[in-house]
Amino acid sequence: MKNSTSIPLNYSKKQHTSNALARIYCNILTEFKSGQTAYATIAIIAQSCIGSAAAMVLLMSNIHDFSKMTLLFFVTILCMGYNAAVLAQLKSKTTFNMLLVSLLFSSSIIITNLL
């Protein structure tokens, strides 16, 4: 078996899924890097709109307890963090990751509060 030329068949569906997600992430990151100025500008608008919608959903409820205000704080900080990353011209991977975190957090806030 030591001198065999066959390809090992260590393949699982979980590996394929994670590799597919990693490939999609790398492709989108490469595209973001190639046109960072244009994509960052468009992303600021989209991310700010989704962040403000998340803040609105949090403030629309009649109960303003500490947990909702903490979530509002994190939505605001993540949105401002991405905007600051763009203005500070941080590395494109850092900026892109901050965009993803901000969008995912704001979207999850919207989804959980509307359901």
Image (spheres, helix red, strand yellow):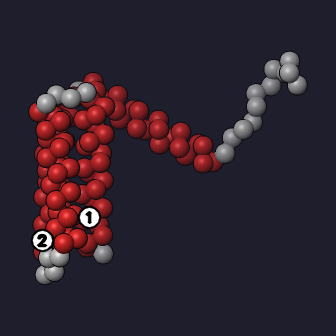
Residue at image x 25%, y 72%? 113
Residue at image x 24%, y 35%? 95
Which badge, 1 or 2, is on the more N-terminal residue? Answer: 2
Q: Secondary structure at mark 1?
A: helix
Say above or below: 58 vs 104.
below
Coordinates of residue 55 in the picture (x, y in percent): 14, 63
Residue at image x 17%, y 76%? 65
Q: CA distance from mark 1 to mark 2?
A: 12 Å
Image quarter in which the C terminus is found: bottom left
Badge 2 density bin: few <14, some 14–19, many ≥20, Cα 10 Å: some
Quarter holding residue 1: top right
Quickly name the residue at label 2: 59
Quickly name the residue at label 1: 109
Identified by mark 2, the residue type is: Leu
Q: Tell me: 10 left or right of 115.
A: right
Quarter holding residue 76: bottom left
Q: Tell me: 79 left or right of 25.
A: left
Say whether marks 1 and 2 touch (CB < 8 Å): no
Confirm whether residue 81 shows in the render: yes
Coordinates of residue 105 in the picture (x, y in percent): 28, 56
Coordinates of residue 31 in the picture (x, y in percent): 31, 30
Q: Secondary structure at mark 2?
A: helix
Identified by mark 1, the residue type is: Ile
